[in-house]
Amino acid sequence: MQNILQDISIRRKILNYNKFTGKEFTVGQVYLGIDLGGSNMTAALISSAGAILDLEKIETKAQQGPEKVIRRIVCVSKTVMEKAKIETKQLKGIGIGVPGVLDTKQGVVKYSPNLPGWKNIPLRKKLRAAFKKTVIIDNDANVAAFGEKWQGAGKGYEHVVVYTLGTGIGGGIIQNGKISHGSCDGAGELGHTTIITNGPRCGCGNYGCLEALASGTAIAREGRKTIRSHPGSCLAKLVNGSKQPLTTKLIFQAARAGDRVALAIIEQAGTYLGISVANIINLLNPQIVIIGGGVSQGGESLLKYVRAEAKKRALKELYKCTKIVRAKLADRAGVIGAAGIAIQDNP
């Protein structure tokens, strides 16, 4: 009876996922996708067709250091496998997305600002020892970008650029269907391209980076500055009424209500992002540019400014053959992309 209930539970998740993606499910081979973040980690079993069989999410507890975090990665992975009645020998491969600077060829995490103590950690070697399976590691933004290319808004395209707008701004570049890593695994740092000289200081130490101008942190900072000079605005009233810190969510809420102050903040961020997108269009000539991350929840209220500025600045013929759209996979992009890079390496 328990096995029947388990099968029903898995099938329900598959059906829900199919409703989300609009595609048929076939089991095929099973891969493990892991998305490691500074706050949380997620492990999911993914079929070779890209469907989620089961998923488990727990806190990372990054402050405990690399060894304990790695043990938690193994633990959450084995938990999701037990839930789905999948044995290690049935896994075809494992992929993991990790925040920070990596050596993907050696499988080493060289440095991660969100994971204290992670310096030259041989993550691939440790996971191989735990699972006795092929393990592929890559930067978390690259992995999320690959997820969108494989099963999300970029499906069917070979030249894809993905922006991830959150606390910071990450990016991933897909060329000829594969992640572009650059000469030392540093390609795709879209958030740290300079948009305006002498702009606000970025966490990386530079001034005027896209991240310092259009990330969730930057938008909220601009909002706090603006409501001090516009105390009667709808945005100021929302913030005072909620008795909570100002967030991008409140700014978008005020904008939907027609508040001019909030609209001006979003237009400014969208314009800066549009400048970056125009540069990317002229530089890489992608088929599609995808905007993801928490800030992308603003939808068309943000994208319309991005498109308008990119159209104004990009070469006309290149802009015409580039779509600019919102991401589809939300927080699933990381685990789906992680499995996807494992599939690409070991089909």
Image (spheres, grey):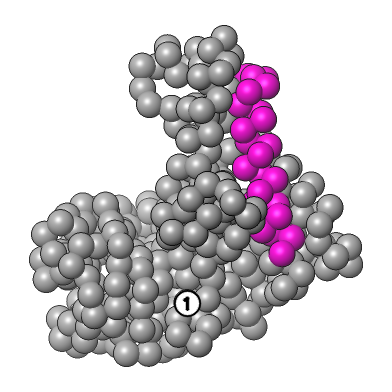
Front residue of 137 and 165: 165
Looking at the rendered structure, the number of numbered marks drawn on it comes to 1
**Is 130 displayed left or right of 162 in the figure?**
left
- The structure residue drawn at horizontal position 46% and vertical position 65%, both measured from the top left corner, is 141
Q: Count residues near mark 1 (Cα–Cα under 10 Å), then give few for <14, some for 14-19, many for 20+.
A: some
- The structure residue drawn at horizontal position 43% and vertical position 60%, both measured from the top left corner, is 204
Quickly name the residue at label 1. 186
Percent of width and height locating residue 17: 46, 55
- What is the quadrant of residue 10 in the picture? bottom left
Percent of width and height locating residue 21: 55, 57
Image: magenta residue range: 257-279
- The structure residue drawn at horizontal position 45% and vertical position 70%, both measured from the top left corner, is 143
> Is 94 contained in the magenta span?
no
**Is 95 displayed left or right of 270 in the figure?**
left
Percent of width and height locating residue 76: 19, 63
- The structure residue drawn at horizontal position 68% and vertical position 37%, both measured from the top left corner, is 267
**Is 342 displayed left or right of 272 in the figure?**
left
- What is the quadrant of residue 2 in the picture? bottom left
For badge 1, the amino acid type reads Gly
| Residue 280 can be seen in this image | yes
| Residue 234 can be seen in this image | no
- What is the quadrant of residue 245 in the picture? top left
Reply above or below: 299 against 40: above
> Is 273 contained in the magenta span?
yes
Secondary element at tag 1 = loop
